[in-house]
Amino acid sequence: PKLSFVSEVFHPMVELATGRVDTGGCFPKWHPGKDYASFVLPYLHQAMVKRDFFIEEARTPLNQQARDLFLEDPAAFAEKAAECAQKSLQQVYHNNPGCSLQFTKGPVEAHDKIIESLRTADTSYAMEDRKAMLVDWFCNHYKNQRVHVGVEASTVETILLPSAKQ
């Protein structure tokens, strides 16, 4: 599968012109039925925050300028990355047609729980184990909640979680 940002992201693993993310380090071969789009999220989170992903020599960066700036002037890199993040926040719920994952304003509490689970994942485990732990956590956390799964006109699968007010 392809993973791309729809807004500009200034990061060595993200191709600036297209927003394409290099997932080959974690998923050199995709196994349908074994690997799921949700497995990419912990990897993506780590790629955005861990220094190893910025300086990794084994993989050619998709954005050499971002890598060079990170190594030569970390403060300037942080400023450029922050500018991109601010622009991205302006279109956080803009969904391009045909994208597999669609983002909507949902219950803040549910989003916060998922983000917290990603942030507190024990990085001493292998990526395969962390993927399994996230899926287990997600399934266990939401197994007793009523959810509506529907297919929208664009045939994108959505999971709508009820808000606490309903």
Image (cartoon, rainbow, N blue to C red):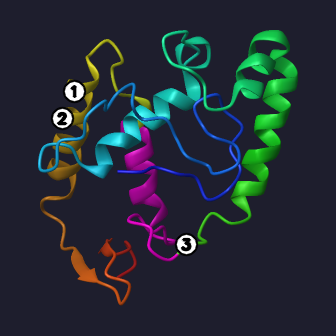
Disc 1 + disc 2, Cβ < 8 Å: yes
Find the distance from the CA under tag 3 to the CA under tag 2.
29 Å
State which quadrant residue 110 falls in: bottom left
Q: Is residue 160 above or below residue 78?
A: below
Q: State left or right for residue 129 relative to residue 118.
A: left
Identify which residue is drawn at 48% across, 67% down: 103
Q: Which mark is residue 132?
A: 2
- Name the one closer to the observer, 27 or 147: 27
Q: Element type at marker 1?
A: helix
Task: State the extent of the magenta-drawn residues as a range.
Answer: 97-117
Q: Is residue 25 above or below residue 147?
A: above
Identify which residue is drawn at 25% across, 82% down: 150
Mark 3 — residue?
96
Give the amino acid type for the residue marked by disc 1 in the picture: Glu
State which quadrant residue 43 falls in: top left
**Residue 106 drawn at (x, y percent):** 46, 70
Give the amino acid type for the residue marked by disc 3 in the picture: Asn
Disc nearer the start of the sequence (3/1): 3
Q: State left or right for residue 40 relative to residue 145.
A: right
Q: Element type at marker 2?
A: helix
Find the distance from the CA under tag 3 to the CA under tag 1.
30 Å
**Residue 94 drawn at (x, y percent):** 61, 72
- Determine if the magenta segment contains residue 107: yes
- Determine if the magenta segment contains residue 1: no
Find the distance from the CA under tag 1 to the CA under tag 2.
6 Å
Q: Is residue 165 above or below residue 58?
A: below
Mark 1 — residue?
128
**Residue 120 drawn at (x, y percent):** 39, 28
